[in-house]
Image (spheres, coloured by chain):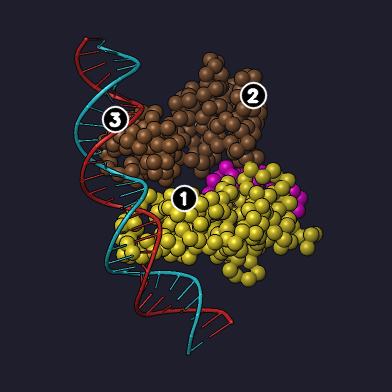
Chain colours: A brown, B yellow, C red, D cyan
Amino acid sequence: MSERVIRLLLADDHPVVRAGLRAVLEGEPDFAIVAEAATAERAVELAAAGGVDVVLMDLQFGPGSAMNGAQATAAITARAGGPRVLVVTTYDTDADTLPALEAGATGYLLKDAPPEELAQAVRAAAAGRSALAPSVADRLLERMRAPAAALSARETEVLGLVADGLTNQQISQQLHLSQATVKSHLVHIYTKLGVDSRTTAVREARGRGLIR
Amino acid sequence: MSERVIRLLLADDHPVVRAGLRAVLEGEPDFAIVAEAATAERAVELAAAGGVDVVLMDLQFGPGSAMNGAQATAAITARAGGPRVLVVTTYDTDADTLPALEAGATGYLLKDAPPEELAQAVRAAAAGRSALAPSVADRLLERMRAPAAALSARETEVLGLVADGLTNQQISQQLHLSQATVKSHLVHIYTKLGVDSRTTAVREARGRGLIR
DNA sequence: GCGGAGTTCAACCTTTTGATTGATGCCGGG
DNA sequence: CCCGGCATCAATCAAAAGGTTGAACTCCGC
């Protein structure tokens, strides 16, 4: 396994970042960058075409593409025998990391990682091992300890609108509900999160990555 | 002027981005990258030391440094004869661009800009000409047309806390004011923004980039 | 088919908000 | 020097929003 060259696909909408990853990684003798993609869709195409061992995937792809990095990751890992996906992004919040990991990403790194760490992570991913940034690993473990008070879909929806600053009435209109129902959802949210007001609920949910 | 090599300083906390900028720019024969800075403070130091014509400045510098890119830009452009500052960032909101431009940045580019555009912008900056990304230029012109209902410093402060979901009472405590004063500020904010509730005020201000 | 979780709603009460009116002191430009 | 904008506060009041309690109904798993 280790005598083979690791073939890489760079997926990022920023030319500068692609060039940076290329510059940092092509110095490694056992790496070969075989393709680049500026959109998530293109990344999925190229990954499906084969000939790639590890995809370095950004999460944000600008307003140009309808698909985000997490969706692309899911599409790539869905088919068996496909490449591993290593997420490399700027953002370090639960709301970003969790969907990506659930989508099947083998690793999750931050763009401020030193080049050496990046190379190590790529080798780990190629070998099927996980590679998580320390901060991500920390929060993942923390999450295992806490029961992860999951909100229902409806509750998350309501809380998302609360986070946007909407009033109960505005929420009720947007969701075609009565205010009573919205309030009821909020009560359940409060008890689940262990808070007692909308603002603290939003804070708490943001902290836990339940909303973005 | 044009026979001279343009000496560049790269200021960005991400090693990958620095490598990317270096890869993209050092291909140009009239560019020479003479230094890199991983923090805003270091960028100010290096710029003050001289020998630099253009600084490529990021705005976000991670939790490590107390100074942000806009502050560093102000510090660099404050001294006469210093280098030009060209802001190169991911973020494209008024709340980011305006402080940077006010701080004396010669140009403002987005990281998704094609390499060629980047090189052009560096040459423009070296010659003292401005270089703005199209989207930034658009919004700048739009701002000139609109009366630009500027909020006072205090009003912006209050509105920021409103945006965080605080009640008038909490705001009054945090700012050591009476609730009456907070309400008074809010009334002024509403009339200036042409709205009549806190949530719409937050929306409007977000849209205009008055708060982030 | 019982029980629990999720979704929906009503009635009730408290807190917050926004409108209004009015007042004081400070500062800077005409 | 006076005026206007800014920041500060007071008092009052009606309307809106928020939070609590209680209660149906559905769906799903055991």
For residue A200, say whether it is visible.
Answer: yes
Kind of element beneath mark 1: helix
Question: Residues at badges 3 and 1 in contact (C-beta under 8 Å)?
Answer: no
Same chain for marks 2 and 1?
no
Which of the chains bears the disc numbered 2? A
Q: Which residue bears the numbered disc 1?
A: B200
**x 53%, y 27%: residue:** A71
* On-image quarter of the N terminus of chain B: bottom right
Judging from the image, mark 3 belongs to the subunit labelled A
Q: Which residue is mark 3?
A: A147
Q: Give B4 or A163, whichever is nearer the viewer.
A: A163
The amino acid type, in three-letter code, at marker 3 is Pro
Gap in angstroms between the C-alphas marked 2 and 1: 44 Å
Residue A61 lies in the magenta stretch? no
User: Which quarter of the figure has residue B162?
Assistant: bottom left
Residue A38: image location, x then y, percent: 64, 34
How far, Cα to Cα, is label 3 from label 1? 36 Å
Please check the rendered image and state whether residue B14 is part of the magenta-colored stretch, yes or no: yes
According to the image, label 2 marks what residue? A46
Q: Which residues are magenta?
A: B11-30
Which class describes the residues within 10 Å of circle 2: few (<14), some (14-19), or many (20+)? Answer: many
